[in-house]
Every structure is written in structure tokens, then in C-alpha cells.
Image: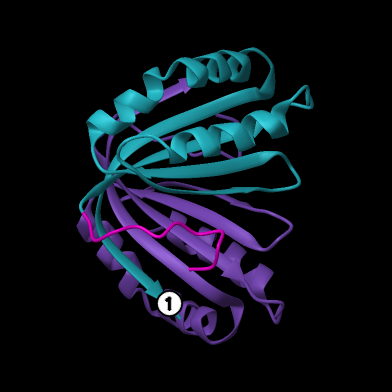
Chain colours: A purple, B cyan
Amino acid sequence: MNKKGARTPEPPYFAVIFSSQRTAVDEGYGPMADRMVELASGQPGFLGVESARGADGFGITVSYWASLEAIAGWKAHAEHRVAQAAGRAKWYGHFELRIARVERTGSGP
Amino acid sequence: MNKKGARTPEPPYFAVIFSSQRTAVDEGYGPMADRMVELASGQPGFLGVESARGADGFGITVSYWASLEAIAGWKAHAEHRVAQAAGRAKWYGHFELRIARVERTGSGP
């Protein structure tokens, strides 16, 4: 894929699908989001991340991980926990998080 | 979630994560995309869909399904197959498709 897409290995591996509606509150959102990508990228078991957000503020970020343990480690990371709390408090009107096991893949054209 | 997010049942269920880079070619893309959502929504085992695309043309669409059989049925749908061929030919510079089993969920704030 191009630079926006994640290069992932052969399945199985795991995906965290994070769907969110942004509020109108900025207050450091951009730098935080960039920092979280940088930080996640250095975590054990991180495989890749891809993200898109439309002009309406609805966005989807999918991060890919080698194991559920790797996801648990990232969730519990201290700096990530601070960002999670700020996200709940001001940046996200709502979000849904789904953890899934990737079983098959394809690509094109 | 708001109207942009999918309301899905308790896991397990399945997700099709479709990440794509749009070309500059329009030629009916919008109506096709709307039609595919309408058509998918009427398929057996369809649970929901959510989608986001940024100004850079990179987008993620995640559709949710009750079973792998339901996903296979949707993939093979005649009108969807026509859209898939057009997507490969003109609308997508590249795409990745991942089929995953959703195992855990969360939401907030």
C-alpha cells in the first residue's frame, strides 16, 4: 500500500478498530495524535497503523498488533493512558473500540 | 454512537476492513459508494458499516457481518462484483482488505 496504509505480515494478527467522532475542541489534539502514533510504533508487537478522518469529524484508526498481549501492553502504557483520559474528557464526542483477529487479507488493484 | 458509527451486537462477529487510496477519477464514485452501502445493508448477516475518508483521498470503510458466510455472499453479489471491477479499474490507486473476527469491544466517553 502507499505510505498511508499499513504493511502487515501474513495473518493471523490482531486489529484495534477505533471509530470516533471528534468534538470541536482542538487543544493539542494534533500533537497528541502524532505522539501516540510515534509511541505505539515503538511498542512490542506493533505491526502498523492507518487512519482516516472526514471533514465531518468522524474518523477510523486501525492499529495492527502481533498479539492480544501486545494490545494490552499498549492500552496500559502510562503516556497512552493520559491521552485516553484527555480523549474521553474533551476530544471525542463518542468512540467505539473493537479488538479483532485478522484471518484473511487481500489487496489490489 | 452517532449516526456515523455502526451499532453492532455483542461479539463475536466479523469485520471487513477496507483501506483504500482514491484516484483523482470521479466518474460515478459517489453514487456507487452510496449504492453499495444501500445494497450491503439489505444482505443477510449485515450488521453495520462505518466509513471515513480524509482530504488526501485515503479512506477506511469497515463493514460488520454475522458470519464468514455472510461476507462471502456479499463478495459474490453480482452488482457488487461490477463495482469491485470498476474500483480496481479506475477508483482505487490501491486497496487492502482484511477480514477479522471481532472478539472484544468498548466504547466511551
Residue B106: quadrant of the picture: bottom left
Q: Is residue A15 above or below residue B73?
A: below
Question: Which residue ends up furthest to the front in the rendered image?
Answer: B42
Q: Is residue B87 above or below residue A70?
A: above
Q: Would residue A63 be found to the left or right of residue B36 on screen? A: left
- Residue B38 percent location from the top left of the image: 54, 38
Residue B4 drawn in magenta: yes
Q: Is residue B89 above or below residue B60?
A: above
Q: At label 1, which amino acid type do we have? A: Gly
Residue A83 drawn in magenta: no
Q: Residue at x 36, y 74 (%)?
A: A77
Pointer 1 residue:
B108
Q: Residue at x 32, y 24 (%)?
A: B73
Mark 1 packing: few (<14 Cα in 10 Å), some, or many (20+)? Answer: some
Q: Residue at x 46, y 84 (%)?
A: A85
A102 and B49: which is toward the camera = B49
Residue B22: in sight, yes or no? no
- Residue B88 percent location from the top left of the image: 59, 16
Chain under callout 1: B
Q: Which secondary structure is most common in the magenta stretch?
A: loop
- Residue A69 percent location from the top left of the image: 21, 59
Q: Is residue B89 above or below residue B17?
A: above
- Residue B104 percent location from the top left of the image: 25, 61
Q: Secondary structure at mark 1?
A: strand
Q: Would residue A71 be found to the left or right of residue B34 on screen? A: left
Q: Would residue B14 be found to the left or right of residue B36 on screen? A: left
Residue A96: in sight, yes or no? yes
Residue B87: quadrant of the picture: top right
Q: Number of callouts in the render?
A: 1
Give the residues drawn in magenta, as a range.
B1-11
